[in-house]
Image (tube, grey):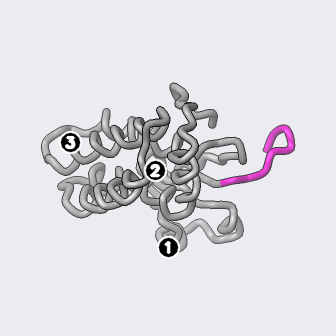
Amino acid sequence: IPKGKRFKAAQIGGPSGGCVPAQFLDKPIDYESVKEMGAIMGSGGLIILDETVCMVEIARYFMEFCVKESCGKCPPCRIGTTRMLDILERICAGRGEIKDIPRLEELALQVKKNSLCGLGQTAPNPVLSTLRHFKDEYTERIKSKKKTRQSRPII
Protein backbone atom coordinates (compact mmCIF):
# COMPACT_ATOMS: atom_id res chain seq x y z
CA ILE A 1 0.00 0.00 0.00
CA PRO A 2 1.50 3.38 -0.96
CA LYS A 3 3.09 5.70 1.58
CA GLY A 4 3.43 3.01 4.26
CA LYS A 5 -0.26 2.95 5.11
CA ARG A 6 -1.82 -0.16 6.61
CA PHE A 7 -4.27 -2.47 4.86
CA LYS A 8 -7.75 -1.99 6.30
CA ALA A 9 -10.12 -3.90 4.05
CA ALA A 10 -10.79 -5.21 0.57
CA GLN A 11 -13.99 -4.40 -1.26
CA ILE A 12 -14.72 -7.59 -3.21
CA GLY A 13 -17.21 -8.28 -5.98
CA GLY A 14 -17.96 -4.89 -7.48
CA PRO A 15 -20.46 -2.28 -6.26
CA SER A 16 -22.83 -4.80 -4.71
CA GLY A 17 -20.06 -6.94 -3.26
CA GLY A 18 -18.91 -6.48 0.28
CA CYS A 19 -16.05 -5.24 2.42
CA VAL A 20 -13.74 -7.75 4.05
CA PRO A 21 -11.46 -6.62 6.92
CA ALA A 22 -7.72 -7.20 7.31
CA GLN A 23 -8.25 -10.16 9.66
CA PHE A 24 -9.29 -12.23 6.61
CA LEU A 25 -6.32 -11.23 4.46
CA ASP A 26 -5.00 -14.80 4.31
CA LYS A 27 -8.35 -16.42 3.46
CA PRO A 28 -8.73 -17.97 0.01
CA ILE A 29 -10.73 -16.02 -2.53
CA ASP A 30 -13.30 -18.56 -3.63
CA TYR A 31 -17.09 -18.54 -3.67
CA GLU A 32 -17.67 -20.15 -0.26
CA SER A 33 -14.89 -18.31 1.61
CA VAL A 34 -15.98 -14.93 0.30
CA LYS A 35 -19.62 -15.69 1.18
CA GLU A 36 -18.63 -16.64 4.76
CA MET A 37 -16.90 -13.25 5.11
CA GLY A 38 -20.10 -11.41 4.11
CA ALA A 39 -19.25 -10.57 0.49
CA ILE A 40 -19.85 -12.06 -2.96
CA MET A 41 -17.58 -12.79 -5.90
CA GLY A 42 -19.87 -10.67 -8.10
CA SER A 43 -18.04 -9.10 -11.02
CA GLY A 44 -14.71 -10.16 -9.56
CA GLY A 45 -13.64 -6.63 -8.65
CA LEU A 46 -11.10 -6.15 -5.88
CA ILE A 47 -10.39 -2.75 -4.34
CA ILE A 48 -7.83 -2.44 -1.57
CA LEU A 49 -8.67 0.11 1.14
CA ASP A 50 -6.09 1.60 3.49
CA GLU A 51 -6.44 2.76 7.08
CA THR A 52 -7.53 6.27 6.09
CA VAL A 53 -10.77 5.18 4.39
CA CYS A 54 -14.06 5.65 6.27
CA MET A 55 -16.13 2.50 5.88
CA VAL A 56 -19.37 4.43 6.30
CA GLU A 57 -18.37 6.55 3.31
CA ILE A 58 -17.56 3.39 1.35
CA ALA A 59 -21.02 1.99 2.09
CA ARG A 60 -22.61 5.32 1.08
CA TYR A 61 -20.60 5.46 -2.14
CA PHE A 62 -21.58 1.98 -3.28
CA MET A 63 -25.21 2.41 -2.17
CA GLU A 64 -25.39 5.58 -4.27
CA PHE A 65 -24.29 3.53 -7.27
CA CYS A 66 -26.88 0.80 -6.57
CA VAL A 67 -29.70 3.35 -6.21
CA LYS A 68 -28.82 4.81 -9.62
CA GLU A 69 -28.69 1.34 -11.19
CA SER A 70 -32.04 0.17 -9.85
CA CYS A 71 -34.62 -0.32 -12.59
CA GLY A 72 -37.28 0.85 -10.12
CA LYS A 73 -39.75 -1.95 -10.82
CA CYS A 74 -39.91 -3.48 -7.36
CA PRO A 75 -40.55 -1.41 -4.22
CA PRO A 76 -38.00 -3.18 -1.98
CA CYS A 77 -35.15 -2.15 -4.26
CA ARG A 78 -36.52 1.19 -5.49
CA ILE A 79 -37.63 2.48 -2.09
CA GLY A 80 -35.43 0.42 0.23
CA THR A 81 -32.10 1.30 -1.36
CA THR A 82 -33.11 4.97 -1.50
CA ARG A 83 -34.00 4.95 2.21
CA MET A 84 -30.70 3.19 3.00
CA LEU A 85 -28.84 5.88 1.07
CA ASP A 86 -30.79 8.59 2.95
CA ILE A 87 -29.66 7.13 6.28
CA LEU A 88 -26.04 6.80 5.13
CA GLU A 89 -26.01 10.37 3.81
CA ARG A 90 -27.45 11.64 7.08
CA ILE A 91 -24.74 9.82 9.05
CA CYS A 92 -22.03 11.14 6.70
CA ALA A 93 -23.38 14.67 7.09
CA GLY A 94 -23.04 14.48 10.87
CA ARG A 95 -26.79 14.18 11.51
CA GLY A 96 -27.01 10.46 12.23
CA GLU A 97 -28.55 8.94 15.35
CA ILE A 98 -27.58 5.72 17.10
CA LYS A 99 -31.02 4.29 16.27
CA ASP A 100 -30.09 4.61 12.57
CA ILE A 101 -27.77 1.60 12.89
CA PRO A 102 -30.43 -1.04 13.63
CA ARG A 103 -32.81 0.69 11.20
CA LEU A 104 -30.19 0.49 8.46
CA GLU A 105 -29.45 -3.16 9.21
CA GLU A 106 -33.13 -4.18 9.24
CA LEU A 107 -33.83 -2.26 6.05
CA ALA A 108 -30.82 -3.88 4.34
CA LEU A 109 -32.00 -7.35 5.33
CA GLN A 110 -35.53 -6.65 4.05
CA VAL A 111 -34.25 -5.28 0.73
CA LYS A 112 -32.00 -8.33 0.32
CA LYS A 113 -34.83 -10.76 1.15
CA ASN A 114 -37.66 -9.15 -0.81
CA SER A 115 -36.13 -7.70 -3.98
CA LEU A 116 -36.99 -9.45 -7.21
CA CYS A 117 -33.68 -9.26 -9.06
CA GLY A 118 -30.00 -9.79 -8.39
CA LEU A 119 -29.26 -6.08 -8.02
CA GLY A 120 -31.79 -5.59 -5.22
CA GLN A 121 -30.78 -8.84 -3.55
CA THR A 122 -27.09 -7.84 -3.46
CA ALA A 123 -27.28 -4.02 -3.19
CA PRO A 124 -27.34 -4.18 0.65
CA ASN A 125 -24.06 -6.14 0.78
CA PRO A 126 -21.73 -3.14 1.22
CA VAL A 127 -23.90 -1.90 4.09
CA LEU A 128 -24.31 -5.30 5.72
CA SER A 129 -20.61 -6.16 5.43
CA THR A 130 -19.46 -2.81 6.82
CA LEU A 131 -21.97 -3.08 9.66
CA ARG A 132 -20.76 -6.61 10.36
CA HIS A 133 -17.05 -5.82 10.38
CA PHE A 134 -16.87 -2.07 11.08
CA LYS A 135 -19.94 -1.24 13.19
CA ASP A 136 -17.71 0.71 15.55
CA GLU A 137 -17.05 3.21 12.74
CA TYR A 138 -20.78 3.83 12.37
CA THR A 139 -21.12 4.37 16.11
CA GLU A 140 -18.08 6.65 16.26
CA ARG A 141 -19.23 8.62 13.24
CA ILE A 142 -22.68 9.18 14.73
CA LYS A 143 -21.45 10.09 18.20
CA SER A 144 -18.78 12.50 16.92
CA LYS A 145 -21.18 14.15 14.44
CA LYS A 146 -18.20 14.14 12.08
CA LYS A 147 -18.99 15.78 8.72
CA THR A 148 -16.56 14.46 6.15
CA ARG A 149 -18.84 13.42 3.33
CA GLN A 150 -16.75 13.37 0.22
CA SER A 151 -18.18 13.42 -3.27
CA ARG A 152 -16.53 10.01 -3.56
CA PRO A 153 -14.29 8.16 -1.16
CA ILE A 154 -10.58 8.05 -1.81
CA ILE A 155 -10.01 4.55 -3.14
Q: Earlier in the sequence, mark 1 or mark 2?
A: 1
Q: SS of the residue at dot 1?
A: helix
Disc 2 marks which residue?
43
What x and y, as percent, mark residue 121?
29, 57
What x and y, as percent, mark residue 153?
57, 34
Q: Horizontal placement of 140 versus 74: left or right?
A: right
Q: Is residue 3 magenta?
A: yes
Answer whether residue 126 is visible to the viewer in this image. Answer: yes
Label 1 or label 3, whichever lies nearer to me, is: 3
At 46% from the left and 50% from the top, the residue drawn is 43
Q: Is residue 93 magenta?
A: no
Q: What separation in Å lies between label 1 and label 2 (alpha carbons)?
A: 17 Å
Question: Are discs 2 and 3 less than 8 Å apart at CB?
Answer: no
Q: What separation in Å lies between label 1 and label 3 (alpha carbons)?
A: 27 Å
At 50% from the left and 64% from the top, the residue drawn is 132
Q: Earlier in the sequence, mark 2 or mark 3?
A: 2
Disc 1 marks which residue?
36
Q: Amino acid at mark 3?
A: Arg
At 30% from the left and 61% from the top, the residue drawn is 106
Q: Which residues are magenta?
A: 1-8
Considering depth in this image, is 81 or 138 the residue closer to the camera? 138
